[in-house]
Image: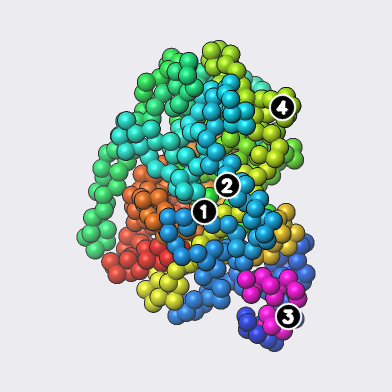
Amino acid sequence: MVFQMHWQHGRRGTFCAVFGFLGLLTSTISVAAAELSHREDLSVEDRARVVSVTAAPSDFEKPEPFEAMSGGAATSRATPNRDAFSQSSANLDFEDELTFKLGNGLFRKLWVSSPSSTQASDGLGPLFNARSCQRCHLKDGRGHPPASLSDSAVSMLMRLSVPPRTAEEKAAFARGIIHRVPEPTYGGQLQDHAVQGIPSEGRIQVDYEDHTVTLARGEQVSLRKPTYRIVDLGYGPLDPEVMISPRIAPQMIGLGLLDAVHPGDIIALADPNDSDGDGVSGRISRVYDSISGTMTIGRFGWKANTPSVQVQSAEAFNGDIGISSPLVKSAAGDCTPAQEACLALPDGVQARLGDSEAPDPVLDLVVFYSANLAVPARRDVSDPTVLRGKALFHAAGCAACHTPKFVTRRDAEREHHRFQLIWPYTDMLLHDMGEGLSDNRPLSNAGPREWRTPPLWGIGLTKLVNGHTNFLHDGRARNLLEAIIWHGGEAAAAKDALVDMPPEDRNALIRFLESL
């Protein structure tokens, strides 16, 4: 908060005292101005400050200034408990806090099928995965794979698509106008629930095959490799060329801050041809933004196929719950022309309120809530083991993808997200993660082996909030060590560095991750 306050009010003398910038040389300012020439929202002096404060640490004997404040002035300092991911941005004023609480109510709202006596809540489905946003993002946190065939697993989705076939589909896919071509009968994702009168589409079944990995010092780690099946199909067989890809719901914290990162900062991290020869070649995900009608940077989703919190929320409303909004107006949700009974059912659109089931300001309130779920403060940043693990994290090359720091835009859409030093540990780029994590399904411009670098902030509180430590896009990893060992492709060298570590170093690195 001190960081943000001094920058906003221009108290350069105090800022220099806090950050040790007394005697800042003109040459340093010139270099910074060149490095951050894309930051039109910053003055030349501000650019120098940003370069200095986001530089890689050189001293791992002590924490960096404000390292505990992962979300800048928006960081939640509440004592961590099961609600650690459900706190509001700490810099909201009274009126914004009220808006946040209204959004929270709608995020938790249980929708019902049409017609109903509760006109403010009908419109569910007809096919759906959950009756509320909260049912997937449990406690605003991370989902999990099904524990058994009888597990409804509402926090896991199965994406469906087929290869582009028509000339129109191929052209739209190549241009990035569409992310994928839906399966002809079942649509873009499997819906494992349905309203009364029609069958659900099916259920996800996962079988695991254990693989033992031997580390450099002889320790053994068991990895579980999943195989997915869709059973109890309600509308006939799937297309022979169907491609499937499982997803567990990610945690919700810090989304608005990631939305406020300057696009030029993301572009500056991309190295698609590995020009620096470090083996890491992150790529920008270019996606179609339905709001602006232009191609832009994808920041959200496991494959970085969504451009903003607003679009992400609208698509989740429609695809997961079957609720239409001003941005996605299909009241039948993911029902396809092949599902005639589904399309024939009544919807929840009320003409007096608008042409969607979640008319204004419902979506805006949910977006505000989603954008202002606070990142919890770091724990144990001064602990010697944590600091040692941080040094090992950098030495192993993990920070090449999990970029620790950004300073958000001065002109960000939301005032409380402006000019904040944040520590998300992501570059929001696509990286080849190797054949072991391939889902064999392209999405937009992301290949089957490519995944967006997930943010690491809050990862150490997953067990406390959600009662499990299932990581990666499908929850196959049962702990952080397994998650790292699954890394391949561009991350293989960092994974190998961990495998070669003595146990005490490996434990220190994990301890650092648990402090995030």
Going from N to C along the chain, the mark reached first, 3 or 4, is: 3
Q: Main secondary structure of the magenta part?
A: helix
Report the side of 369 relative to 130 (left or right).
right
- Badge number at residue 104: 2
- Rounded to the nearest angstrom, the CA distance separating label 3 from label 1 is 35 Å
Residue sitting nearer the eye, 29 or 249: 249
From the top left corner, tell me how far across and down residue 140 is, in percent: 50, 48
**For the residues carrying marks 3 and 2, which lies nearer the camera in this image?**
2
Count every numbered label the image shows and give the total. Answer: 4
Q: Is residue 493 above or below residue 470?
A: below
Q: Secondary structure at mark 3?
A: helix
Q: In this orientation, does residue 40 appear?
A: yes
13 falls in the magenta region: yes
Name the spot of residue 493 as percent of width and height, x first. 41, 58
* Residue interval drawn in magenta: 1-16
Q: Are marks 1 and 2 in contact (CB under 8 Å)?
A: yes
Vertical side of 220 occupied by 13: above or below: below
As rendered, which of 480 and 377 lies closer to the eye?
377
Q: CA distance from mark 4 to mark 1?
A: 31 Å
Distance from the alpha carbon under mark 3 to that under mark 4: 51 Å
